[in-house]
């Protein structure tokens, strides 16, 4: 039996890393004797997260262009040339059957080199509005797996496959876990639970909002699980109480989703895909500090189909209290959001992406 080899690259944020790991795990199920190598950016979180998931990783000396003119931008051409050269060496030594990129700085030079060396490449685009790197790479990619419709204006239509984003498989049936989840988090079953998600590092503006609105939220017979992120935990942990659980990171995402009645979340691509599968009422507060305003576009794709509520950071002070109060007290509206967001879920994404990879190597 042939031993297949795969290089995967994705990083910078959990939204790029976890899809790459999910694809590798599914490839391993199909090809138990396959060899895997990840390529990331030297100082980014993938250098820890990938080895924790059991895979080897090599780092490239690469970073993105800064928006302001500064010294880091002057270094960019050198970093790019260095990364292209190192990518070529990695590919030559490892001899992969396919190279898969899920976004992030390192996947650019790696996939570019694989394309010029004639190795099949697969792009997994998580967002509803692709970044510049994937737009450039798409011209030579073998297949492009997308999570949103109507991306023909960015990518060659004949290479695109609508698969959705890889998500944790333990989210597929969370309703059956609700009672266990309420017990696990020591929640009051007679109260509604608000889950606040700010991403792995945290979201400063979302945290400020919860701090400001806390009394108002608790007064509606609501308890809070507040994931404030590791950058902010030391400051916000003082709010821990029987009604408020402040955590930097959540290990059991399936349980926390099962326990939640309403969710406030950023709108990173992976979070949006997970929340479609989870099927709970969501208020999206997109980060305005993301390239190409990706998060607002991701959220709007759901909101335009009446699957969630969107609040811009600039409107939080004037609109949040009213929006939250009307949602938490309106069971009809909650049910409508649950039904609509669930219809947008693509739970078989990882399997379908791997199907596309298998077509290329067989």
Image (cartoon, grey):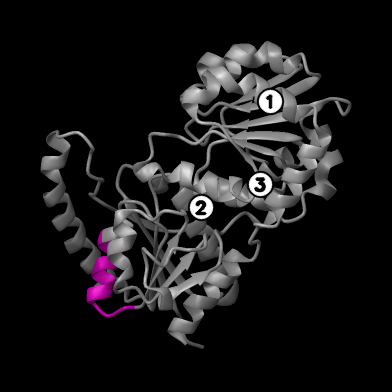
Helix, strand or loop status at disc 3: loop
Q: Is residue 253 above or below residue 146?
A: above
Q: Position of residue 360 (x, y in %)?
A: 44, 82
Please count the marks in the image: 3
**Dot 3 corresponds to which residue?**
306
Q: Position of residue 203 (x, y in %)?
A: 49, 28
Magenta stretch, main secondary structure, is helix
In the image, residue 114 lies in the stretch drawn in magenta: yes
User: What's drawn in magenta, residue-wise?
Assistant: 109-119
Asked whether 119 or 49 is in front, the reply is 119
Mark 2 and mark 1 lie on one chain; the one further toward the N terminus is: 2
Q: Is residue 110 above or below residue 358?
A: above
Instruction: Tell whether 170 sits left or right of 116.
Output: right
Residue under the image location 57 percent in, 47 percent down: 272
Q: CA distance from mark 3 to mark 1?
A: 16 Å
Residue under the image location 51 percent in, 24 percent down: 315
Q: Nearer the viewer, mark 3 or mark 1?
A: 3
Residue density around tag 1, few if under 14, some if 14–19, many if 20 or more, within 10 Å: some
Residue 163 appears in the picture as rendered? yes
Within the image, what quadrant is residue 281 found in? top right
Residue under the image location 77 percent in, 22 percent down: 222
**Dot 1 corresponds to which residue?**
324
Mark 3 and mark 1 lie on one chain; the one further toward the N terminus is: 3
**Dot 2 corresponds to which residue?**
18
């Amino acid at each position: 039996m042939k031993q297949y080899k795969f290089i995967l690259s994705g990083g910078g944020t959990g939204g790029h890393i976890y899809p790459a790991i999910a694809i590798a795990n599914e490839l391993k199920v199909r090809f138990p004797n396959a060899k895997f190598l990840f390529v990331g950016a030297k100082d980014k979180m993938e250098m820890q997260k990938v080895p924790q998931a059991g895979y080897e990783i090599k780092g490239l000396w690469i970073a993105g262009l800064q928006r302001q003119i500064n010294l880091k931008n002057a270094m960019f051409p050198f970093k790019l040339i260095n990364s292209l050269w190192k990518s070529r060496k990695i590919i030559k030594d490892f001899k992969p059957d396919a190279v898969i990129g899920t976004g992030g700085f390192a996947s650019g030079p790696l996939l570019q080199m694989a394309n010029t060396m004639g190795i099949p490449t697969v792009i997994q685009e998580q967002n509803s509005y692709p970044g510049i790197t994937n737009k450039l790479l798409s011209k030579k990619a073998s297949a492009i797996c997308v999570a949103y419709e109507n991306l023909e204006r960015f990518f060659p239509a004949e290479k695109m496959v609508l698969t959705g984003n890889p998500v944790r498989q333990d989210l597929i049936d969370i309703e059956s876990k609700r009672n266990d989840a309420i017990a696990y988090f020591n929640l009051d079953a007679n109260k509604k639970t608000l889950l606040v998600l700010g991403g792995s590092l945290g979201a400063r503006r979302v945290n400020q909002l919860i701090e400001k609105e806390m009394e108002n939220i608790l007064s509606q017979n609501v308890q809070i699980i507040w994931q404030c992120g590791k950058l902010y935990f030391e400051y916000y942990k003082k709010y821990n109480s029987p009604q408020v659980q402040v955590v930097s990171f959540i290990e059991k995402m399936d349980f926390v989703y099962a326990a939640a009645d309403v969710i406030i979340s950023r709108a990173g691509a992976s979070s949006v895909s997970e929340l479609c599968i989870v099927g709970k009422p969501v208020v999206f507060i997109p980060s305005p500090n993301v390239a190409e305003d990706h998060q607002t576009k991701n959220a709007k794709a759901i909101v335009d189909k009446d699957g969630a509520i969107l609040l811009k950071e600039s409107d939080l002070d004037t609109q949040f209290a009213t929006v939250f109060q009307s949602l938490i007290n309106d069971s009809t509206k909650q049910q409508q959001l649950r039904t609509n967001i669930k219809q947008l879920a693509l739970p078989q994404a990882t399997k379908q992406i791997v199907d596309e990879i298998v077509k290329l190597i067989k």
